[in-house]
Image (cartoon, rainbow, N blue to C red):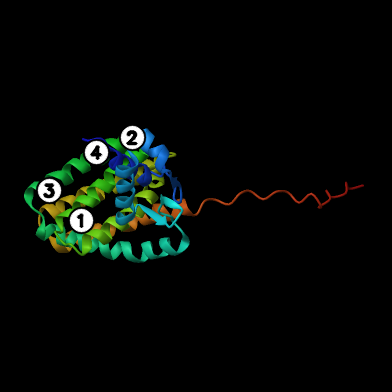
Amino acid sequence: MDRKTEAHSTLKARILSQALAPGAELDETRLAQEFGLSRTPLREILQGLVSEGYASAQKHRGARVAGMEAASLRAFFQTAPGLLATAARLASTEGAPEQAEALQEALSAIRVATEADDATAAALATHALLHQIGEMTANPYLRPALTRVLIDYTRLSAPVFETSGKKDRKQLRKLLAQKEILVQTITAQDPAQAAEAMRALWQMAQTRMMARLQPEPLPEEPDETEQPPAPAG
């Protein structure tokens, strides 16, 4: 892998895992030094990230990691379920046998990361699985849209794979089992069941995403103006 390709892949992984937070500046000088590249190829990488939806650029302000504002999240939750189900359905009928092998590889990576409680690795492996499903559609209209959806899907997914007890681990095992069903239905070339499996996976993932987006409220501070009750007597 040459330096330019490695830099492109590394920056995408950092954005997907939120090691580079939404809205973070992508400083050309610092990144060029880090990856041992001149400014021209680094700018080409950033332009590629912008065109793919990983970053945004404004005149005289340089590139920044794509934001996750309320409006974009609303559009994401509106668009993702239908797009994912369509991708699964098309992948089951259009995908080649050798492409299905990549699904199994991604599934194995998800399994290893889940067992290791590695939330970042599990999120990135899930991205690889869903991206491969998109590639299997062979649809030049759907793939760019799915690429954009999967960026936010993955950025929201890292907390989904975090565990804090037996309940979380049980839910993650159910997520893994559903992904196995998804891969089985696509490999079996069953479009209706593949779409249904993807819808079920989305519902499970969305539930955990929303739970992470709605944290428990902070405990209320006691009202210092309230006086303790007078002692009886």
Point out residue 162 in the picture as x, y percentages from the top left corner: 40, 41
Tell me the residue that label 3 is attached to. Answer: 100
Crowd tier of the residue under label 3, counting other residues whose Cα lies within 10 Å: few below 14, some 14–19, many 20 or above = some
Residue kind at label 4, given as amino acid type = Ala
Q: Residue at x 27, y 43 (%)?
A: 125
Tell me the residue that label 2 is attached to. Answer: 35
Marks 4 and 3 close (CB-CB < 8 Å):
no
Q: Nearer the viewer, mark 3 or mark 1?
A: 1
Marks 2 and 1 close (CB-CB < 8 Å):
no
Point out residue 153 in the picture as x, y percentages from the top left corner: 34, 53
Structural distance between the alpha carbons of marks 2 and 3: 33 Å
Structural distance between the alpha carbons of marks 3 and 1: 12 Å
Q: Secondary structure at mark 4?
A: helix
Q: Which numbered disc flags the more N-terminal residue, 2 or 1?
A: 2
Q: Quadrant of the N terminus?
A: top left
Q: Residue at x 20, y 56 (%)?
A: 134
Specify the label residue 109 is tagged with: 4
Q: Which numbered disc flags the more N-terminal residue, 4 or 3?
A: 3
Q: Secondary structure at mark 3?
A: helix
Residue kind at label 3, given as amino acid type = Ala
Marks 2 and 4 close (CB-CB < 8 Å):
no
Q: Which numbered disc flags the more N-terminal residue, 2 or 3?
A: 2
Specify the label residue 70 is tagged with: none
Q: Nearer the viewer, mark 2 or mark 1?
A: 2
Q: Nearer the viewer, mark 2 or mark 3?
A: 2
Q: Which numbered disc flags the more N-terminal residue, 4 or 1?
A: 4
Q: Nearer the viewer, mark 4 or mark 1?
A: 1
Q: Secondary structure at mark 2?
A: helix
Residue kind at label 2, given as amino acid type = Phe
Q: Is residue 2 left or right of residue 72?
A: left
Specify the label residue 134 is tagged with: 1
